[in-house]
Image (cartoon, rainbow, N blue to C red):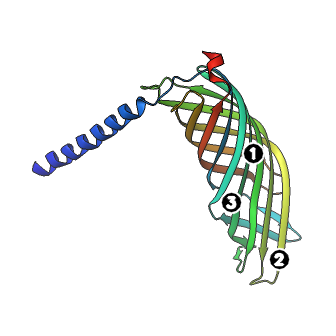
Amino acid sequence: MKELLNKLENIMKIVIFFALMILNLSSFAAVPIDGWYTSLFGGFTYVPGNVDKTVNGFNRNHVLYDNGFDGGGSFGFKSNPMRYEGELTYLKVNTRQFQINHVTQTDISGYNQALLGLANVYYDFPGFTSLLQPYLGVGLGFGWVQTRLNSEWPIGATSFTASNSAFAYQGAVGVTFNFAENYALNLGYRYASTLTLTQFGQRFQANMANVGAAYRFDGTHYK
């Protein structure tokens, strides 16, 4: 019983700490305003294996990539609670492992990179303070993807390069920190995918965790 009470006490302390922090930050918050804005963002990217292709009798699949990075920018218009924007994202991950005809290759190198151009629509939920505003979004557009898989052993030096373009889409969720009238910070997660890429034999997918900064143009004009 005593252990349970101690756990409840610790939980209450954590809740009170975050509540006080939010109340303190709220004194610096600004009410989100309508109008044109631009943003820059970047973060970490995880890309699942996306190659299952046979060329000249050699089948390459079971590709693993290291975690990589992404970065980009957007330009849009906010009409509360909706936002409409165009976005450009570049991302890259390095090749960690792949197989040829079910044989794991060694001494490998390579990468997977993509450029995504998307038109997004976001819904900004009313926050419990003007500082924090959760959001959901979807996007449609086009993606260009390139991969390179090179190895030295055990079957000798091999090289595979492919690039393809296809229809792309994404979903996004996150929260906006409205700490000033003209400025805001975004913390979010995005999942992006293309349709099946002919040259890859599979579709491209990416999971992105991003931090972004937004600038709202001439905020006083929209009051």
Residue 211 image offset from top left, x and y in percent? 58, 45
The kind of secondary structure element at disc 3 is loop
Q: What residue type is labelled 1?
A: Thr
Q: What residue type is labelled 3?
A: Gly
Q: Which of 202 and 176 is in front in this view?
A: 176
> Which residue is tagged 2?
158
Is residue 47 at all visible to an observer of this figure?
Answer: no
The disc, 2 or 1, on the residue closer to the chain's N-terminal end is 2
Q: Residue 49 carries which label?
A: 3
Q: In which quarter of the image is residue 19?
A: top left
Residue at 69 percent of width and 49 percent of height? 71
Q: Alpha-carbon distance for marks 3 and 1?
A: 13 Å
Q: Determine whether, in the image, residue 2 is placed left or right of residue 108.
A: left
Residue at 36 percent of width and 38 percent of height? 21
Crowding near the residue tagged with mark 2, few <14, some 14–19, many ≥20 C-alpha atoms within 10 Å: some
Q: Alpha-carbon distance for marks 3 and 2?
A: 19 Å
Contact between labelled residues 1 and 2, with CB atoms less than 8 Å apart? no
Q: Residue 194 carries which label?
A: 1
Query: Residue 220, relative to residue 116: is it above or below?
Result: above
Crowding near the residue tagged with mark 1, few <14, some 14–19, many ≥20 C-alpha atoms within 10 Å: many
